[in-house]
Image (tube, rainbow, N blue to C red):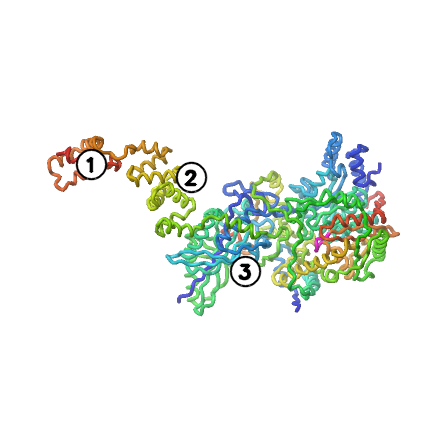
Amino acid sequence: MIKKMIMDKERLREVIGLSRIGLPEEEFDEVLGRVNAVLRMCDEMQELEHENVRPFEWDVKKAPSRRADEPVKWDNRDVFLDQAPVREGDFFRVPRIISLEEDNGVSGEAK
Amino acid sequence: MDFYKLSAKQIADGIRGKKWTAEEVLSAQLERIKKFDKKINSVVTLCEEKAHKDAHAVDEKIARGEDAGLLAGVPYLTKDNFCTTGIKTTCGSKMLFEWKPPYDATAVKLMHEAGAVLMGKTNMDEFAMGSTTESSVFAPTLNPHDITRVPGGSSGGSAAAVAAGYCPIALGSDTGGSIRQPAAFCGVHGMKPSYGQVSRYGIVAYVSSLDQVGPITRNIEDMSIAMDVLAKADRNDSTCDAYERPSFSGCAGNGEIKGKKIAVLTGFDKNSIDKPLVDAIDRTVKICLDAGAEVVEAQLPITMKHAVACYYMVALGDASSKLACYDGMRYGYHEDGKNLSEMYKKSRNSGFGKEVRRRILIGTCILTRGYYDNYYVPATRVRQMIADEYAELFKHSDALICPISPALAYKKGLVEEDPVRIYLGDAFSTTPNLAGLPGISLNVGFTPDGLPTNVQLVGPRFGDAQILSIASAIEKRAGSPRIAELTEGGC
Amino acid sequence: MARQIVIGLEIHLQLNTKTKLFCNCSTDYIGATPNTNVCPICLAVPGTLPLLNDHAVELAVRMGLGLHCEIHNNTRFHRKHYFYADLPKAYQITQYEDAIAVGGYVDIIANGKPKRVRLDHLHLEEDAGKLVHPTSDGRLSGAAYSLVDYNRGGIPLSEIVSEPDINSPAEAVAYVMQIRQLARYLEVSDGEMENGSLRVDVNVSLSNPDGSLGTRVEIKNINSLKSIERALEYEISRQNRALDDGEKLIMETRLWDDAAGVTRSMRSKEGVRDYRYYLEMDLAPIEAKPDYVEKIRQSLPEMPWDKRDRFIEEYGLSLDEAVQLTEQRAMADYFEACVAAGAPAQKCANWVMIEVQRILHEHETSISDFSVNAETLGQLIAKVEKRDISNTQAKDILTAMVEKGLTLEDAIKKCGASGGRVTGADLEEIVKRVIESQPEAAEAVRSGQDKKGAKVKFLQGLVMRETRGSADPAEAAAIVQSILK
């Protein structure tokens, strides 16, 4: 049973917000056309017998060992900060944060 | 001495044998670039001062009798998504137009340690999204063999540079054909190694599980030396395999295909492929047979049917994710906004080109709730099926011959509209990335009109040395690619 | 209407690693100059790749084992996408529905009653950076701009999610305290709410009369144990009032305002939080093979609850005493070493809980930095047991060791206690001195006015004080009387 999903303008509006990229209303149809074309191409994948196939994992020859817990100081920090577009002293500076739209409260700070 | 005609090995041998100096070679090549590149537009940044310094260091080492590395004094260029400390790395985008990375990609470091001399950065499709190098923020690169045509993409600049004789080796990155297809359009050899063969550290990411670094050359011997230099374990990349690599140049030199089993892909409509490219496959098959190999037909039904859909899911989703860090805060293009959201939006809208913005949106659509479960997740299982189907094929064969592109190099500005050809092109080029297999785009000749005809050799996972060896044997009989005949003058 | 209170907690623990979860930057960020513990990886510079910290995995497994979880041998990381200034990649690397440790439980005692709180899982994720808002109260609201410091970004966190088994604010506090104690015992985390190495988010709902689950509300910005209790009490009464008034509650996130003592709605649109979780392909699976896990299990110290029960059994201590002594591992170890040096358990317990604690508090040090080691204290207490010195003298000797850095022998000499009991002629000397210093009392005894013997007792007391308790009280009284006859 293939579940054919069709992307609509409402979800596209949401996606535009989620990706922090603008899209003028007159270009909605073009983008929806491309998205739905890809989805139609992918519908058929659902019908493949893959219930018993595991999700993709690399066939690795020799896994690298995990990183040791030893601190290293980065020596290019000053040069990097000098080039930052929004530097203020030792900080990066950002304009007013409207917390309610943006904050997902993950870090648990007082917002 | 026409240094531009020499291979990397010949240049390095000559330097080691004190027949000429790295400085001489470099100067000649820089001159060639300056002479022809106004027309070809392959190089976006030249780093002359650093190049002279590096060449000088190689010459000093040689004078002292020290080992100056496998590629001693060999000048090279790299795609503009390779991080190079203090040298602009734009990824063909306004977003990083002025950006100078604070570190070197591992590939760049390894080339430097091997004595190679970096001359500059090459043009590419913006953030590697494209197959013609026309979406770059810079003017498009032209195909050196026919300047009314594109060089392919996204590593078009690197492929064109090698075809134009700027350097014997250029580096590119391949996510869904971005080294192999431009190599085919420009009539040179291009290799995408197995996933995990070469470190990705310092390559500005497009798709985490598909990107690989690879060399573009005019002969297989140079390609295998480049692999010796680049294919190394790297602590900075957890996806780079830690196994002990064999000697690639050792294997390639052997060049024997007697007794090998070569599969040739069937099960697609040959009428959708440009005839010279079908002939190229036939020619290659004949070479293999004449050399004593056993050639069998093979099919990949699941792969050919579903790989393109699978690729779009994987690639678009990841692209939207990896491009989310560009927000104008810590680096890159920045535009003010009256609040944080607006700053993000303005920086990203102005910094990214139209195609990149589209793909970010489409990728985000794919990952959004509901669509992720019904489309992305099945794609990850199909990916394993594709890998399994290839693995089964390679149980009975040493290599697979198939096309790399259904079309000869396109005319400038022309958009391929035939959906079948678009589909086939994607199918041939993306499946080795999906399954993590090595693929070589091998030039086997030119049409009477002078357009390149390449074929693709795909190998089993980590069978890179194996296919280099087979490619070397084919090249012995098919001949090495020729350098484009360039004329001076502006565009 | 008595609705059932249903509480679940999410605890974030900063792990005690030296470097961040995915890069070699130091985790020592408190007090550091902003943006100095940073590198291309944790700043999300293009082309960088995350590198998993081996020690973080070990600590996560340790904590998981302490929580009685099942450790999964092969788990993955995922990306959680959202845009915010403290998140450079615009996605957090976390584990989504593929946690390294699953199930488990914690036994607590709240209001004297034992209870088992089941856990859903423990997973690994990275911390976000810190924002500084230039407003008078440091809060975001009203800030014209904000400053970002990425020192904290990338520090390893383990998130522990409980089942909604908790049914009162007191249980919630007891649960957090138990997690904190375990984390400290296992040296997995400092577990300090004040500096953010332990963070708590609370979920609370009130069940409907028919037993069905009520609407769940999440509360954030709780920064102390006390606040957990206050926030829950407030929210429970708010929900009760609302339901009594026939209002429909909405599933939302509210912020605890400690100053005002209320929770406030964030008024965010629920359902727009589409994090688009998917597999992080820049990282290999986290391997935690059975023999690796077993090795870690073998290296675990005694659990705090096991130690507590053993102290009751082995040393004959009461529950309260055992709880207090095992609160910190270092204190428990000190106590046991003290007993091993030859002092009786109950006396050691008293000394450690009262005298030692007092001195530590006065000098603002911890037991680990205490200048008198457990063996020495044990010897001192043993001497009191043998009646070589009195309890009072022992306290003086301890003080002398701490304040003057003397050895036990030197401190004993200094306090004049090496002579053992003061008796005979020595005692007479002291009695005479005391009598001379108290002419009124002496006269009262001499003149026979001390009918009830109160003055004798008074003088005897002074003599005992003079001898620091090392005289025989009866002998002292006798000498007083004989001199004043």
In this view, the mark in front (1 or 3): 1
Q: Give residue B89's position: percent from left, percent from top.
A: 69, 44
Image quadrant in which you'd find residue C338: top left
* Camera sees residue B86: yes
Say if mark 2 contacts mark 3, CB within 8 Å: no
Which residue carries the number 3 mark?
C269
Q: In whole angstroms, how far apart are the C-alphas of marks 1 and 3?
A: 83 Å
Give the magenta-colored segment's residue range. Answer: B433-437
Q: Amino acid at mark 2?
A: Asp
Q: Kindly give the residue lying farthest to the right in the view shown.
A: B448
In this view, the mark in front (2 or 3): 2
Are dots 2 and 1 on a single chain?
Answer: yes
Which residue carries the number 2 mark?
C369
* For marks 1 and 3 on the same chain, the one whose residue lies earlier in the sequence: 3
Q: Magenta segment, principal secondary structure?
A: helix
Which residue carries the number 1 mark?
C476
